[in-house]
Amino acid sequence: MKRKIYQELLNWKNNQDHVKPLMVLGVRQSGKTYIIDEFCKNEYKNYIYVNLFENTNVIQLYNSDLTSLEKFNRLKLLLNFDFEQEDTILFIDEIQESERLIAELKYFCENHNQVRIICAGSLLGVKLKRSKFSFPVGKVKMLNMYPMDFEEFLIAMNQEMLVQCIKDCYENNHQMTAPIHENALNLYRIYLVTGGMPESVKNMVETKGDYIKYDQSILTDIVSSYFKDMDKYVVNESEALRINRVYDSLPSQLSNISKKFQYANVTKDARAREYATAIDWLEASNMVLRCKAVKTPEIPLEGFVDTDTFKLYLSDVGILNNILKLKIEDILNDNVSLYKGVIAENYVANQLVCNQFDLYYYRSDNTSKVDFLLYTKNGIIPLEVKAGSATQSKSLKLYIEKYHPKYAIRISTKDFGFDPKTNMKSIPLYATFLLKNEK
């Protein structure tokens, strides 16, 4: 399946000035190993794949007291592969298993920068935050990989013509014809079922969109695998319990009227100091996305963040719906009652992050909130998400009257449009991935 990160991998390869080792981070089972393997096979003459779960000899080598040069030379012998030869790539998977090898990437960068290395791993972000060895800051290029966004999903479903039609309407502010608009919304709802996990999308592709044949256990198994991996990367059972409690609370957190994460929703007497580490763990694992509250929407948004107020989204909308145990028929028929807005908002958060937006939202008090704030070439742009066609928003109206943005964006089931009186841009839910053009 086509992944847009492939182009970023190419950009890294073609940087001839000084190519640093590349480290790809992302939630487990988002397709890191698959796409990196495809890239290495397609783009290099010589390629070797090393999985540290399987090749523990490499771990032992880097745990030794040998010098960096001795380790470097013995690694070639151990692998029986000269990764210094021209047009060669070394892919080290599950690199989190060797903190010392991660630290040694600095040596590769400074002394053997002709060697091309890509690294990836499960819960690598957690390992980096908790490593006992110093991370080679400035000596490694970091790249984040996320589940498939809606554009990648459409391409996987052989809907390239629809993708082009959506792009044309977005760029020219033309409406889609009604049947095509409805077809795109139906595909959006199928995406709410599968989410962007490649295995889940692949299963829907193989069933040719027949949801009756779709295997819902795929997402259940993915979530289970997250927590099976956890034992290796937590301090003790108490920390594991707190992480589970936070994650289990997220569906109800997203639906609470306060529009912020509330520790009391985790357990009755929960306190921030008890659960801050658990939230950090979930963020580092990329299982959740933090959306920061901003009271003053000015540039730079990061400078006006209220550090005590935030929202947490699930990393994938399909996983959210799986955790909610929603029937596929109810999702496809838009019959999810009060949670419809929660699901649409989580979906938009996923699409924004996939397309390199940081997540912020506006919260001035307990009554005035705007779902997202985008830092764009046109300044700070407010974005409101509506799960249906009813698009009235008192909070957004108050925001516009107070801060006078160049325009505002409303995402809903309505077709493309622009109201010059209110400077309101209407974008269908299925076109959210195109907001990258606003940057």
Image: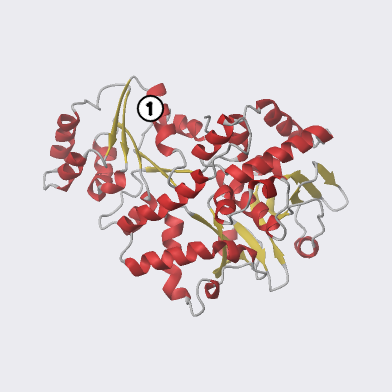
Q: Position of residue 296 (x, y in %)?
A: 65, 66
- Location of the C terminus (image quadrant): top right
**Residue carrying label 1:** 40
Residue at x-position 25% and y-position 27%:
83
Residue 394 in which image quadrant: bottom right
Q: Position of residue 155 (x, y in %)?
A: 61, 30
**Residue 146 at least partly seen:** no
Residue 261 placement, left or right of 45: right
Residue farthest to the front, as pictured? 212
| 50 and 410: which is toward the camera | 50
Residue farthest to the bottom, as pictured? 269
Residue at x-position 29% and y-position 39%:
109
User: Colour mode?
Assistant: secondary structure
**Residue 193 at least partly seen:** yes
Residue 341 placement, left or right of 68: right
Callout 1 amino acid: Cys
Q: Position of residue 174 (x, y in %)?
A: 82, 35
Residue farthest to the left, as pictured? 65
| 355 and 344: which is toward the camera | 344
Residue at x-position 72% and y-position 39%:
186
Above or below for 161 versus 412: above
Helix, strand or loop at mark 1 = helix
| 89 and 94: which is toward the camera | 94
| 418 and 127: which is toward the camera | 127
